[in-house]
Image: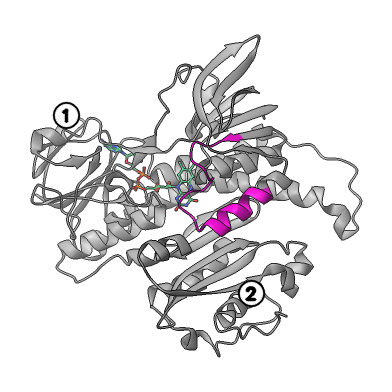
Amino acid sequence: MRDLVIIGGGPGGYVAAIRASQLGMKTVLIEKDEVGGTCLNRGCIPTKAYFQNAKAIHTIKRAEEFNIEVSGFKFSLEKAKARKDSIVNQLVSGVKQLLKANGVELIKGEAALIAPDTVAVNGEEIKARNILIATGSVPARLQVEGADLPEVITSDEALELTEVPSRLAVIGGGVIGLEFACIFSHFGSKVTVIEYMPNILGSLDKEISKRMGVFLKKQNIDVHTGAAVTKIEKKDGEVLVHVEGKKEAFTVASDLVLMSTGRRPCIKGLNLDKVGIETEKDFIKVDENYQTSVKGVYAIGDVIGGQMLAHKASEEGIVAVEKMAGLNSCVHYHAVPGCIFTFPEIATVGMSEEEAQAKGITYKVGKFQFAANGKAMTMGEAEGLVKILADQNDIIIGVHIIGPHASDLILEGTMMVKNRMRIKDVIGTIHPHPTLGEAIMEAVLDVHGEAIHLA
Ligand code: FAD
C-alpha cells in the first residue's frame, strides 16, 4: 500500500509529489503524457519562449530609437518552434530528475479510479491511503457552426505551427487570446480579436484593461468587443468568421482562427461517478482541505476551478499534501498574482477597483506613470502605470501594473497584499535607483498624495 497516488503530473501534481516525498510519504505519480502538464508542454513555458521571440522582433524594429541601423531581418517560426521545443524538453527532463531525486515513483499511463483507495493504470491496480487528482484542463471550443474546420485551432495547435499565418482571427480576448494576439502580431500576422463581453480581459481592473485596449490598437491589432461569433466557414480559400457586432453584423476574413474561449476541466475517463465524486459544471468539488466528496480522495489545480494558473495549482498541491500530513497550511487566495505577457506586460494581485466597490470596501488609490520613471525612459518603455489600492485602514488590498517587466515587479505587490501590509509598512523601504520598482514606491506614496516625482 502506497501513502499517496497522484493522477496528473502538471505543476499541481508534480509539485505535490515532491512535497509529499519530502514529508515522508511513499508517493506514486501517474502521467499519461509528459510531466510538467499543460504549463510546461502546452502553456506557460512555450508561450513565454515565443514571447521572447516577439520581444526580440520588437527590439529590432525599434533599433533606430537607439541609433542602430538595421538593414532587415527574417523570422523563422520553424526555428523558433525548435528553440521552444528544446527548452520544453530540457525542463521536462529536469522535472523527471527532480522526481527521481525525491524518490517519487513515476508511471506513464492513463489512470482511472476504481475504488476510493484504488487506481487502475496500464492494467494494474494501485492501492493508496490517499489519492490526489490533478488532471488539469483542456481547451474548450465554442459550439458554433464551422468550429470543427481544420483552420480553426486552439492554443495546443497554435504552438505546433511552423508558418506564420498572414491573417489570424482570435476568438476570445482573455489572457491566452491576447498573449497569442501580441505574439503573432509581432511575428507578422494581421491579427483581429473578437470578444463576446463588453471588455477585453473582463476580470481585470477596468482602468488596466482599457489601457491594454489602447496599446493593442497602437500595435495595429483590431479588437471587436461585444461581438458574438455566429458561424465560421471556408470560402474561396479563406476562413470567414461571421460576427454579430454591437450595431451590425460583420465578417472577419482570415487564414487561421484561434479559438481561445476558455478551458474545461479534464475529468474524462477518471470514473468519478463510479466512486461517487461530486462535480459542479464538471469541476471537482472540494472542501477546505481539498478533499472531494469521497474521503481520502483529494483534488487540486485547474480541475477544481478558480484561477487557472500554474502557481495556484502548485500551491494547492503543496497545501493539500501538507494537510494530509496534519500540517496547518493554507493557500492565501487573496494574494494570488496573475501575469499577462502582452506588449506591455500586465500583472495584478488582490482586488480591482470594481471588486472593492462590489464588496462595499472604502478605498483610496495611488498611481504612478512609468512616463515619470527614469529607468523606464532609458529603456524606451515608459508606457503604463502602477496602481495601488488601500482600504480605509491603509491596508494595501490591490496592486495593478501595466508596463515594462510588470510580471517581475508584481512580486513586491504580492508581498504587500499577502501580508496585509499598510502604507506605513512600505514607506521607508529604500528602492534602488534607477529601477522600475521606484514606480511602485511612488504609487504607494501617492495613496496619501505624497509621491515625490509627481506634479
Ligand atoms: P495541467 O497542467 O493541465 O496538468 C494535468 C496533467 O494531468 C496533464 O499532464 C495531463 O496529461 C494529466 N492527466 C489528465 N488526465 C489524466 C489521467 N487520467 N491519467 C494520467 N494523467 C492525466 N499559467 C500561469 O500561471 N502562467 C502562464 O503564463 C500561463 N500561460 C498559459 C498559456 C497557455 C497557452 C495555457 C493553455 C495555459 C497557461 N497557463 C498559465 C495556465 C497553466 O498552464 C495551468 O493553470 C496549469 O498548467 C494547471 O496545472 P494543473 O497541474 O492543474 O494541470
Tag 2 residue: 439
Percent of width and height locating residue 186? 70, 41
Type of colouring: one colour
Marks 2 and 1, Cα distance to the nearest angstrom?
Answer: 58 Å
Q: What residue type is labelled 2?
A: Ala
Say if mark 2 contacts mark 1, CB within 8 Å: no
Q: Residue at x 59, y 80 (%)?
A: 446
Q: In this view, does 235 lie above or below 264?
A: above
Q: Nearer the viewer, residue 143 or 152?
A: 143
Outermost residue, bottom side: 428
Q: What element carries label 1?
A: loop
Percent of width and height locating residue 85? 55, 39
Q: Can residue 163 be spotted in the picture?
A: no
| Crowd tier of the residue under label 2, counting other residues whose Cα lies within 10 Å: few below 14, some 14–19, many 20 or above | many
**Image quarter for residue 165?**
top right
| Left or right position of 308 against 60 | left
Q: For residue 117: magenta? A: no
Q: Nearer the viewer, residue 47 or 182?
A: 182
